Image (spheres, grey):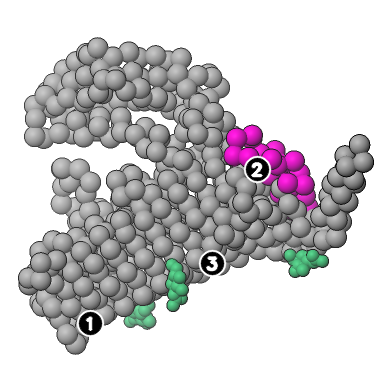
Amino acid sequence: MKVWALSFFVLILSCFLKVESNSSIYNVIDYGARGDGHIDDTKAFTKAWEAACSSSSSSSPTMQVPSEMTFMIQPLYFRGECDPKQINVEINGNIVGPKDPSDWTCYDGCREWIHFEHVDGLRVYGSGTINGQGQKWWDLNAFTKAWEAACSSSSSSSPTMHVPSEMTFMIQPLYFRGECDPKQINVEINGNIVGPKDPSDWTCYDGCREWIHFEHVDGLRVYGSGTINGQGQKWWDLNALKISNSNNVYLTGLSFKDNPRVHVEFKGSKSVYISGISIDAPGNSPNTDGIHIGGSTDVFINDCSIKTGDDCISMVDGSSNIQISNITCGPGHGISIGSLGKHGAEDKVENIHVSDVVFTGTTNGARIKTWQGGNGYVRDIVYERVLCQEIAYPIIINQNYCDHEHCETQNAAVQVSNVTFRQFLGTSRKETAIMLDCSKAVPCKDIILENIYLRTTHGHHAKSVNNNAHGRTQGLMVPVIPLS
Ligand SMILES: *[C@@H]1O[C@H](CO)[C@@H](O)[C@H](O)[C@H]1NC(C)=O
Ligand SMILES: *[C@@H]1O[C@H](CO)[C@@H](O)[C@H](O)[C@H]1NC(C)=O
Ligand SMILES: *[C@@H]1O[C@H](CO)[C@@H](O)[C@H](O)[C@H]1NC(C)=O
């Protein structure tokens, strides 16, 4: 009894001290989080956030996620605007999502897992990890992709979309749209397809009138030994961390692992500092961009290690004044500008400086990709001090980007100008180490290549390709490239 009373007293005292001795700390434990990796701690996180966000006792309160504990959280929306000028989120523990897709509850159709919005002066940092446990979800987009590939196939007059046996596929409403190029199109379903368990969890493209809907598909054949079971599970296909419409934001130190899509996305933000984060997803995980920047300006990304299945860093429309340095990238698709100008869009990206990068085993290094038929520009870009280790295209500009088989030549293009590639050293897995594939109608201007030494992986001479790029070379040039 004595022991009980004493420990009760100590507990009360420590709670008292924790909360009262420093009113600027909002530890999720004090708001009821358990941190055992299983019990849902979402409510505690929300409460701690709300308390920090409305704090009147401190001008820079800290929401704290303590170390050596694992917190299971559902999708969370941290909404500003907050009263304090600066708000800190210190994550030293591990954050995981529910293991099973059926256990996710989504507030907004499950597009983001952790979403901060309208939070000026946000600083997210710590030694913790954010682990989406996403392996189970990567194949969810596969149905649409397989369909589109089959539907636009030019290599077969009767392609087959195949759903293999002894597997269970959970899908949301899917719209298989024609018209397709092949005269006949086969859908062979031998596995199981299930839908979301709870009707309220369906995300619907047309008001939930159909689950699996084929339209305008002449010559369709659907067959196989599988089952289609709409009583299935909830569905998850979301970007792990998105920060939008927030200025003066810091994101540092965290590890991101196996998230199903983009790991970190910034949109519509200004003055963003990302440093010391690591991202780790398998090289074959589709659409898992490491860091994706759109509509944002004054962004600094330093000291990050990124392994993923898509671009390590991608920058799209409205990105300007971005500095990226000391990045290791690979596996992945490189550090990319674009794609831009898709479907005739007017996209603008300017003033990007990328330096001190090590690419290892990536499919691209420095890449600029724009679609035919777009408008706008990519200009004032520098990539420098880049080490390439067995990568497929160390330097690539593709102004004729096309992700399917038929893209007609068009007259418009996003203008690419004033781009410098300086001090590239290393090896290329492809024979073509430098690929400048610019538009005939809107050639690339002022492309500068300086001090480049790229050989093939086997130590052979690498090649270069120049279509419609103008500019000059300086210093050492291996391989040589005609540029004028
Ligand atoms: C209170 O919190 C601030 C900011 O985290 C910290 O610098 C300070 O040392 C803390 N004070 C005490 C008494 O713990
Ligand atoms: C580069 O980034 C890594 C983390 O990826 C860090 O350990 C290292 O200290 C950084 N180097 C410099 C020179 O800042
Ligand atoms: C080309 O880009 C560099 C780097 O952004 C910039 O400093 C320079 O002023 C630009 N040159 C022109 C002619 O705009």
> Which stretch appears magenta?
29-54
- Residue that lies at the very extreme toward the front in this rendered image: 2
> Image quarter for residue 108?
top right
Location of residue 330 in the rendering, given as x and y in whole percent from the top left corner? 31, 59
In the foreground, 329 or 33 = 33
Location of residue 388 in the rendering, given as x and y in whole percent from the top left corner? 25, 69
Q: Residue at x 25, y 60 (%)?
A: 361
Disc 3 marks which residue? Answer: 273
Q: Is mark 2 within 8 Å of ligand 1?
A: no
Q: Residue at x 46, y 26 (%)?
A: 204
- Residue that lies at the very extreme toward the bottom in this rendered image: 475
Q: Secondary structure at mark 2?
A: loop
Disc 1 marks which residue? Answer: 450
**Kind of residue at badge 1:** Glu
Q: Nearer the viewer, mark 2 or mark 3?
A: 2
Dot 1 or dot 3, earlier in sequence:
3
Disc 2 marks which residue? Answer: 35
**Kind of residue at badge 3:** Tyr
Q: Secondary structure at mark 3?
A: strand
Location of residue 442 in the rendering, given as x and y in whole percent from the top left corner? 21, 64
Q: Which mark is residue 332?
A: none
Q: Is residue 22 above or below residue 322?
A: above
**Kind of residue at badge 2:** Gly
